[in-house]
Amino acid sequence: MATPYGPTRVHVHGPADGSPLVLLPGGSATGLVWFANAPALGRRFRVHAVDLLGDAGRTERRGTPLKGADDLTA
């Protein structure tokens, strides 16, 4: 997924019309830590497990520099 801060990966599971549920990993982990929970959660929700920008996983630091939590949540 392209962002102003660089590309990152978002793992998506569940029905396209399900209510969105965003799952964030702990420090130095990736969105894949939710693999065991995604099938159960995906029965009810459209799960989006995000690799955090600048942390482990398939992110790249390029584009606008991250300055704080507001940039991460944007």
Image: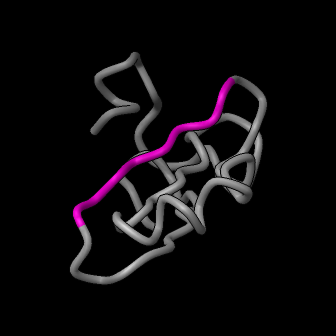
Q: Is residue 16 left or right of residue 11?
A: left
Q: Is residue 14 left or right of residue 39?
A: left
Q: Position of residue 72 (x, y in %)?
A: 40, 32
Which residue lies at the image location 61% right of the left edge and 48% below the top edge?
51
Which residue lies at the image location 41% right of the left edge and 40% below the top edge?
64
Q: Position of residue 71 (x, y in %)?
A: 34, 29
| Magenta range | 19-26
User: Looking at this view, is 7 or 32 the one in front?
Assistant: 32
67 drawn magenta: no
Decide: is 2 above or below 54.
below
Decide: is 26 above or below 64.
above
Quadrant where the image shows the C terminus: top left
Task: Locate residue 67: give its quadrant.
Answer: top left
**How was this image coloured?**
one colour
User: Looking at this view, is 65 or 71 the one in front?
Assistant: 71
Report the label total: 0
Task: Locate residue 3: give its quadrant.
Answer: bottom left
Return the residue found at the far bottom: 16
